[in-house]
Image (cartoon, rainbow, N blue to C red):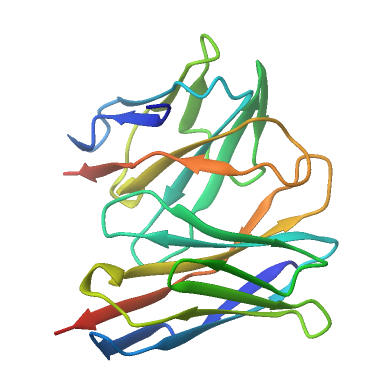
Amino acid sequence: KNQVEQSPQSLIILEGKNCTLQCNYTVSPFSNLRWYKQDTGRGPVSLTIMTFSENTKSNGRYTATLDADTKQSSLHITASQLSDSASYICVVSVFSGNTPLVFGKGTRLSVIA
Amino acid sequence: DAMVIQNPRYQVTQFGKPVTLSCSQTLNHNVMYWYQQKSSQAPKLLFHYYDKDFNNEADTPDNFQSRRPNTSFCFLDIRSPGLGDAAMYLCATRKSLGDGYEQYFGPGTRLTVT
């Protein structure tokens, strides 16, 4: 069964600190992996997308890594800001005709002053 | 700016009273999706359109219907909302099916059932 597991479920960090969110997946056949940021009451917004051959991708203070052998990904946030408070969702795309997305449940990040 | 627009942002309906949520897009994308997202859960795909071809997920209740009158608009009709249908409903679009195309999400409609 295609699944995406994220950890931790929730995280509280001080403003300015770094943090790393984890994503493990059992999706086959794998097409690509995305990290989305979802603010409370808003739709998800894409941060990064990585294919099988890519093992790191950066978007400003966000850096995603992918290990396709172990089927793990991480999202590292550097120098966190209060506006980083949101849910971060790992989404894996299945390589099939309509490339359905398999969503993780997300990590709820709270950045406090 | 090209975008995915959902109206209304917040909708309150009574138990059993039909409700329609709308989604429009200026991206001219072929594919449009409707997701249901309950609190602290991952979005759950209800159905999608590829152009006019409708694709229903196997476990989507019959209570949920959809219409896509043209490329730009897609509607979600809930015929007899129950308390369990209270959720965030997300619309998303995609240029085409196939590897690598990004899904763009709208801001969502928060549905409350009283």
What count of labels does the image hold?
0
Question: Can you tell which quarter of the image residue A4 is in?
Answer: bottom right
Report x, y in % for residue B76: 43, 28
Asked whether A3 or B63 is in front, the reply is A3
User: Which residue is the extreme one toward the front?
Assistant: A60
Q: Name the image quarter holding the C terminus of chain A.
A: bottom left
For this view, does B92 lie left or right of residue B78? Answer: right
Report x, y in % for residue A2: 73, 66
Q: Is residue A49 above or below residue B97?
A: below
Asked whether B55 or A88 is in front, the reply is A88
Question: Can you tell which quarter of the image residue B26 is in?
Answer: top left
Q: Which residue: 21% across, 45% down?
A: B112
Q: Which residue: 76% across, 68% down?
A: A54
Q: Which residue: 16% across, 44% down?
A: B114
Q: Which residue: 65% across, 53% down?
A: A101
Report x, y in % for residue A16: 27, 86
Report x, y in % for residue B34: 50, 37
User: Which residue is the extreme one toward the top?
Assistant: B69
Q: Is residue A19 above or below residue B28?
A: below
For this view, does A93 lie left or right of residue A52? Answer: left
Q: Name the image quarter holding the N terminus of chain A.
A: bottom right
